[in-house]
Image (cartoon, helix red, strand yellow):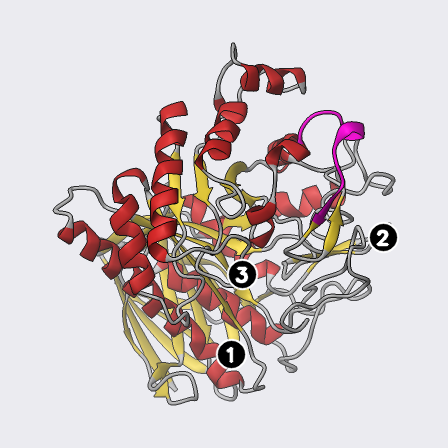
Amino acid sequence: MNATLTLDKDFVLSEIDPRVYGGFAEHLGRHIYTGIYEPGHPTADSEGFREDVIALVRELSMPIIRYPGGNFVSGYNWEDGVGPRESRPRRLELAWGITETNEFGTNEFMSWCKKVGSEAMMAVNLGTRGPDEARQLVEYCNHPGGTQLSDLRKSHGATDPYGIKVWCLGNEMDGPWQMGARTAYEYGRVANEAAKLMKWVDGSIETILCGSSGRGMASFGKWEWESLHESYNNVDYLSLHTYYNNRANDTPAFLAETENMGDFIAEAIALCDAVKAAKKSKKTINLSFDEWNVWYHSGDWGQLGARWDEVRPQLEDIYNMEDVLVVGGMLLAMLQYADRLKIGCIAQIVNVIAPIMTRPGGGAWRQTIFYPLQQCSQYGRGTALRTAVSSPTYDCATRDKAPYLATSAVISESGDALTIFAINRSLTEPLELTTTLRGFGKAEVIEWTTMHHADLKAVNTETNPENVVPQQATGAVVSGETLTATLPAASWNVIRLKL
């Protein structure tokens, strides 16, 4: 098979916001406890954080991390997670059916973020609580001092304000599974008032309105239209969430799902702009794709252990090679809309549908999906280019005329390198890719890495952590303005050029 890609140095889409390579940490399963926090572990530091996990998260270079949820946040009292640990209450946590000890909370999360080199993206509870508690949390976190709440933070050891700039106005408030679920109008009103008060406390913050919990929600479209109408002037982003699965064991259809993700993004942009036009506003709402991943290996809820246990292994998907192609495709779909999609958070980071796995008391290792995220975070910063693609296509259960080639191209921040990310979705045939490079001058191949495996169900484990990893490839050649490379069947590829 043959496909062509045309790139022009002047055909710029947008500067890429590095926050698109963010993560998500929730009090769910073993993400916090025995994931990032495990006092007594051989690698635990003085605060109980696993240093082996810190090292792996730093490899991902996540600019921003969302916390504390997720469904968890809709029943969370933020006051439970600050101050001396011995005085923190134990609570029944209704979202995931555990007993929350609150041993880890806001102060610990902010300390951990500093150690992994990330900014915090804090979510407020708009399920069982409301605008007053939301603005109080902003005051606790961001006000310099001289008030009861800011001085309370100081008494907890944080002399300087945390300065958290991005705030989520609840989580998935359209979902009947959510504590305190609301109609679009109800949610739009409470989100507007919360954002208003939060910005009155700190005018430098940005707020994110909950969009539909997924494109498949019956209310998708109507939800965005109504909630944005009520809150447009006080919010800055609309959130999107999606997960894909291969329960049908139909790999071609599974791989094509990322094309549907692109449609979801385009539709959300159109909805934001429709409200902008209706309100005759000069303000543009951008997008935050703050939950995305593959999720199905562990089942719908993936719960083990007894209800109300302190730590229950949950949603511990073990990812394989075909998941690499979908996660990579999801990243490329987001890059194709870099002009409007400014924040992304893979859900989640450790143990729970995550690129990193740990064993309590034992090791930590990279799952297969770690690598496309790490490579995009490393090489996908700078300027996203518009791509002109001609690719053979296939029909499948999820989409007609899905292209075999998925791709995105990025000029580095320094301007001296071009990275082409490319996926060959054909399960059986290599793809001859011919790329025309216009306006780049002399270019030469620095490196080409590829991920593919004879077994698409192959996984990484603690005892075999490098079963599926990027491999060096050869044969990518630049001649004049033309780059040629043969992409292996079912492969994720990163081709880097020196300009």
Q: Amino acid at mark 1?
A: Pro
Cα distance, mark 2 to mark 1?
Answer: 36 Å
- Mark closer to the chain start, 3 or 2: 2
Task: Report x, y in % for residue 11.
Answer: 21, 56
- Mark 3, Cα crowd under 10 Å, few <14 / some 14-19 / many 20+, is many
Cα distance, mark 3 to mark 2?
Answer: 25 Å
Residue where numbered disc 1 is placed: 488
Q: Is residue 144 left or right of residue 113?
A: left
In magenta, the rendered stretch is 82-92
Cα distance, mark 3 to mark 1?
Answer: 16 Å
Q: Amino acid at mark 3?
A: Pro
Q: Which quarter of the image is occupied by the N terminus?
A: bottom left
Residue where numbered disc 2 is placed: 362
Q: Foreground: 278 or 245?
A: 278
Could you tell me which secondary element the residue under label 2 belongs to? loop
Q: Foreground: 181 or 434?
A: 181
Residue at 53 percent of width and 26 percent of height: 141
Query: Closer to us: mark 3 or mark 1?
Result: 3
Q: Amino acid at mark 2?
A: Gly
Task: Report x, y in % for residue 111.
Answer: 65, 30
Residue at 59 percent of width and 47 percent of height: 75
Residue where numbered disc 3 is placed: 372
